[in-house]
Amino acid sequence: MIKFLKSMAIPTAALVALPGIASASVGLEPNDFVGISFWVISMCMVAATAFFFLETNNVSGKWKTSLALGGLVCLVAAVHYFYMREVWVTTGATPTVYRYVDWLITVPLQMIEFYIILAAVATVSAGIFWRLLIGTLVMLVAGYAGEAGFINAWAGFIVGLAGWAYILYEIFAGEAGKAAADKCPAAVQTAFNTMRWIVTVGWAIYPLGYFFGYLTGGADAVTLNVIYNIADVVNKIAFVAVIWAAAVASSGGKKA
């Protein structure tokens, strides 16, 4: 599987770029900063996809799954960014549905990464995996249901925050946090700590956007989309880059 991913890295990146090329005829205005941010970040996601897939060749076997999974996170995000950009450029509407479809795929994969990097260096309970996955799904499903009007907006916001709080508890004070502190080498501890602060600080942008943009109407669509787009670079590419750095350090910089 890993060999397949490596062999397909460049063709996959090129394939992902096709929607962007096809929609370029729509036209991107020089003062459309949201559209520009969508374009730039979609290219960053493609580049990150190719990089992380190729780097699976430069880490030891126990890290390959984690790094390949990180590449998939960026790949899924890249595809969705192409479509979100086109929705914005052609209609001027916020691509809320596409964002949540993206998050419903990529965010659980990112949460699984916490379990995988722990399992790569120590014996840990599968309960970590399930708790992080459940907390993530509660957070995302509640947020989407609230924004889409399926449930009360405030109820969706509160339940979504509860899911996020559950995740933070697990990675700071729960079994995952304790395993990282007690069972992992320095490189993994550093990566784990950085990843959980990304989840704490970086992810805070999303509930703030929900509150100010949807519940109170205090933020306009342009500002929210630019901030969301920049946040996704940190919360996806930087998140996986931290794992890559730990993998390289743990592998001694040598190919497996």
Image (tube, grey):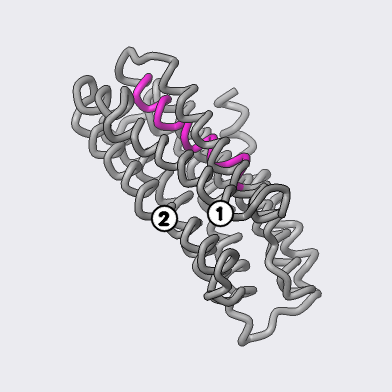
Residue 83 visible in the current orientation: yes
- What kind of residue is marked 1? Met
Q: Can you give x and y, in whole percent of width and height, for residue 97 in the image?
A: 71, 54
- Is the residue 125 above or below the residue 160 in the image? above
Q: Viewer-nearest of labels 1 and 2?
A: 2
Quadrant showing the C terminus: top left
Residue matched to label 2: 204
Question: In terms of secondary structure, where does tag 1 sit?
Answer: helix
Q: Which residue is drawn at 32% across and 30% down?
A: 254
240 relative position to 102: left or right: left
Residue matched to label 1: 45
Region rendered in magenta:
103-119
Mark 1 or 2 closer to N-term?
1
Question: In terms of secondary structure, where does tag 2 sit?
Answer: loop
Question: Which one is nearer the viewer's eye here, 216 or 98?
Answer: 216
Q: Can you give x and y, in whole percent of width and height, for residue 225 in the image?
A: 58, 68
